[in-house]
Image (tube, helix red, strand yellow):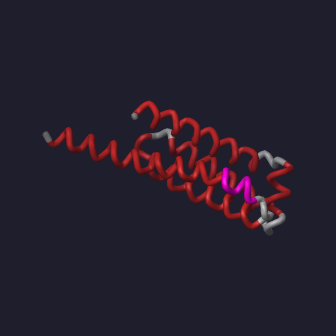
Amino acid sequence: MKILHLALIVIITLLAIAAGMAKLLGSPQEVQFLKGFGFNSLLIMIYGLVQVTGGVLLVIPKTLKLGATITVFAFSLSCILIAVSGNYAFFLISILPIAITAFIFWQSSKFAHDKSLKQDK
């Protein structure tokens, strides 16, 4: 189970960093999509930085839960905007990274609890 947990962390980390970098580098699709919802260039950059930060924090064991929380919120915002835009098929697919990140958070809590039980013995 730990191998699956690690693999999911790597996948979500790469996804969060890639999504954030697309915004930071001013990908025309990202910029056009977000500007359609009233985001200005500064907000797009901040949003990208938040996504990259969440991804980076996921790979540091002590900040994994914080990274997962940030990443879930960032992915959720994207998901909401996708749904509002009317792209329901992509919206349904976009729920998957949120669910995986929530699973990572839950599993990290479980691993921490199991570890503390072993130390108490």
Q: Is residue 89 magenta?
A: yes
Label tally: 0
Please determine whether, in this image, residue 43 is positioned above or below residue 26.
below
The residue sitting at 58% across, 44% down in the picture is 55
Give the percent coordinates (x, y) of residue 92.
67, 55
Quarter the N terminus occupies: top left
Residue 86 among those drawn in magenta: no
Relative to 27, 19 lies left or right: left
The residue sitting at 60% across, 49% down in the picture is 96
Q: Residue at x 50, y 55 (%)?
A: 69
Q: Residue furthest left?
A: 121
Relative side of 21 to 63, left or right: right
Q: Which sits in the foreground, 112 or 7?
A: 7
Q: Nearer the viewer, residue 24 or 4?
A: 4
Q: Which residues are magenta?
A: 88-93
Which secondary structure dominates the residues rendered in magenta?
helix
Residue extending furthest toward the top: 3
From the top left corner, tell me how far across and down residue 45 is, in percent. Answer: 73, 55
**106 and 55: which is toward the camera:** 106
Residue visible at 72% across and 63% down in the picture: 83
* Residue 57 x/y as whole percent: 52, 45
Left or right side of 18 for 63: left
